[in-house]
Amino acid sequence: MGMKVGIAGFSGSGKSTVFQWLTGVKPDPAKMQTGQTGVAKIPDARLDWLSAHFHPKKTTHTTIDFLDTPGLLPTERRDNPRRLSIMREAGGLLVVLNGFSANQLANELRLFREELVFADLEIVTKRIEKLDEQLRKPRPAKQKELDQAEHDLLKRIVAGLEQGHMPNSLGLNPEDEKAIRSFQLLTLKPELVLVNCSEEGVGRALPADLLALAPSAVSAPAKLELELQELSAEDREMFMQDLGLKDFSRDAILRTIYTAMGQMVFFTVGEDECRAWTIPQGADAVEGAGQIHTDLARGFVRAEVVGYEDFVRVGSMKEAKAHGVYRLEGKTYRVNDGDIMHILAST
Ligand SMILES: Nc1nc2c(ncn2[C@@H]2O[C@H](COP(=O)(O)OP(=O)(O)OP(=O)(O)O)[C@@H](O)[C@H]2O)c(=O)[nH]1
Ligand SMILES: [Mg+2]
């Protein structure tokens, strides 16, 4: 299963247009209260190459589940946390800004982030109140200690959020992060800003004040590309020439989203199936094994690993072994993006 990415932003910024452009699924207003899901296959030229090499019966790409959500309304701030709550379970956010009829992009992003902070503060403050209450009651010392530690941590987060810092800049240690994971804070999620631009915006640099807030922001003419996708190949070719468009940006944007959400890919290859798997950047070999099957993680013995580039260079598993680019790695091996792995496990 792919990771889930919430498409977020103010009402009318083009979220549903982006959703359809990326997933091919038609937005259904009736589904909007709980969010609508659509799946996008992540294109990967490396997997295409491996598939052409191994001729497997099946080729399986990684995917992202996109969640189209109701837009926020600047005039209904009290209701925005509820709208945002649909995205609590998402692994990351794709923030869509209106780049076709508005030109205050940095401001739009600033206001959007304020809504995230507002929604998170509501959750954290409620929990602090609850802890205050518990701390006043007579309870075992051990419990009080735990409650006090959580209380202090949450206070620190509130202070940070109120000063406009995102929690991921507060220097939380892994233990702290674990302690607050269940709150599913929106401000802790990886974010990519996508400026939904008009045809005129294609190829134009994004404003510096926006890039100062979101250095990795990207732009794409979602509506234009969606409309072009629906044309016959011949008409499409003609329009693209007229517009001076060389390529669609959809595939590149999908890959950018994938990376921005902190994910990477490893491959399994063979005559039955060539497949790309999703794991968090920095994950180890056991985590990779667990993606394939929990039994493989439990019984993990070692991983046979060849980097994609190395494999392409030498041309076969046999040559990989002969050239010493085929390696045996243990549990704690940090997987590299593009590794071809075969997991050996005892069952
Ligand atoms: N001209 C132009 N119009 C666009 C573009 N993208 C979206 N629109 C239009 O803007 C309106 C809103 O687009 P949606 O994709 O429905 O926006 P949304 O963010 O899903 O809106 P809500 O669901 O209400 O929050 C629609 O009428 C779209 O056709 C664009 O790139 N150019
Ligand atoms: Mg919509």
Image (cartoon, rainbow, N blue to C red):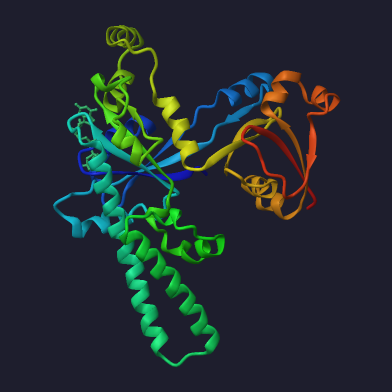
In the rendered view, would you say 97 is above or below 55? below
Above-or-below relation of 310 to 211: above
Residue 121 location in percent, x, y?
32, 63
Quadrant for ligand 1?
A: top left
Q: Residue furthest right?
A: 322
Instruction: Give the side of residue 339 with respect to residue 100, left or right.
Output: right
Residue 301 screen position, x and y as percent = 79, 49
| Residue lying at 28% horizontally and 43% vertically, measured from the top left | 109
- Tag count: 0
Quadrant in the picture for residue 36: top left
Displayed quadrant of residue 226? top left
Relative to 57, residue 154 above or below: below
Asked whether residue 275 is in view, the answer is yes
Image coordinates of residue 296 in percent, x first then y, are 71, 49
Which residue corresponds to the image point at 45% horizontal and 32% vertical from the top-left? 256
Residue located at (33% from left, 7% from top): 234
Seen in the picture, residue 204 relative to 339 is either above or below; the reply is above
**Is residue 26 at all visible to an observer of this figure?**
no
Decide which of 34, 6 is in the foreground and name it: 6
| Residue 151: quadrant of the picture | bottom left
Between residues 88 and 114, which one lies in front from this camera angle?
Answer: 114
Left or right position of 1 against 52: left
Residue pushed farthest bottom? 138
